[in-house]
Image (tube, helix red, strand yellow):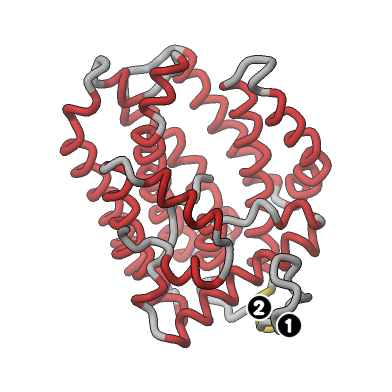
Amino acid sequence: MFGYVRPVLGQLDEEQQEAYQSAYCGLCHTLGKRHGFLARLTLQYDFTFLAILLMAGEEGDRLLCRRCPVHPIKKLRPCVGGGQMDAAADQSMILVYHKLSDDVDDHNMVTGLPYRILRRLFRRTYRRAAQSQRLFDQRVREGLARLRQMEKERSPELDRVADAFAGILASSAAAYPEGSPQRRMLEELLYHLGRWIYLMDAWDDLDDDRKHGRYNPLDTRFQGDAQAEKEYLNITAVHSVRLAGAAANLMELGRWSPIVENILYLGLPAVQEAVLAGRWKEMRQQTRRKPNERSLRSAGRQP
């Protein structure tokens, strides 16, 4: 995933901020416990949101994290754990591995070498996660095969290509029992969120894709004049966020409800504005340079 799905923690009260932090730290702890220290380095806001959605409806266990390797002198923090957090950690590693495979396919032998090395390092971790989440892994592989075929054909059908990616993310709902109303709504939410992510990433990559001659669904759809269609992209992306919000309103989110609403109604619009204005890369680099609690509090705010 891409780091677009983040909250505006300054708009949450102290208790809600602590709840989000407990999910963030809990996912980090679970990644380390299930998949080793290297897996912790893949922690992202997107995966934290996925964990929160999977935990909706179950309180999870509260536990003390091991001391944070990034901030070793800070006190131990309460974290959220449980079966759905384990599922979120496994699904995160599956998505990371397939994203690395996609990066390998997008680069030549020289520029793709770092991605090949990273994919090799995560191969055993991926296999362990895929063993635990077989249905999810199968659907991700099938969805990516469909997506790669359309990219290979340089499909101009933007909706079909975005649909393929959205379906991949919707597969995360497989962590819920078949036929569960919660699963149905979660699939809807994740589908529209996935579509939004794909559109944002396509716009964000527009210049790089042109520079390297890579397929970009927006450039292909609008025959090299995607910038002139910014307002169209803005409208259709807003529509996806609204549909995701409508699905969230039908879910039993429990104590996570204000956090999910914050991300959908404040965080995503702030990120969308930054992406379309060309400020997103700078904004993302700032939070990477400050991977601490302060950066979490400002994440998603407009610069």
Give the camera-side residue of 274 and 216: 274
Give the camera-side residue of 5 and 113: 113
Q: Residues within 10 Å of mark 2 (few under 14, many from 20)?
A: many
Q: Residues within 10 Å of mark 1 (few under 14, many from 20)?
A: some
- The residue that appears at 68% across and 64% down in the rendered structure is 28
What is the quadrant of residue 35 in the picture?
bottom right
Q: Amino acid at mark 1?
A: Leu
* Residue with the mark numbered 2: 79
What is the quadrant of residue 298 in the picture?
bottom left
Above or below — where is 225 with respect to 197? above
Q: Is residue 79 visible?
A: yes
Above or below — where is 43 with respect to 119? below
Q: Is residue 251 visible?
A: no
State the CA–CA distance, disc 1 to disc 2.
6 Å
**Residue 184 left/right relative to 83:** left
- The residue that appears at 46% across and 19% down in the rendered structure is 151
Q: Position of residue 161 (x, y in %)?
A: 39, 28
Q: Position of residue 16 (x, y in %)?
A: 45, 82
Q: Amino acid at mark 2?
A: Cys
- The residue that appears at 50% across and 18% down in the rendered structure is 149
**Residue 35 left/right relative to 211:** right
Give the camera-side residue of 229 and 249: 229
* Residue with the mark numbered 1: 64
**Circles 1, 2 touching at the beta carbon (< 8 Å):** yes
Q: Position of residue 41 (x, y in %)?
A: 69, 53
- Is disc 2 placed on a helix, strand or loop? strand
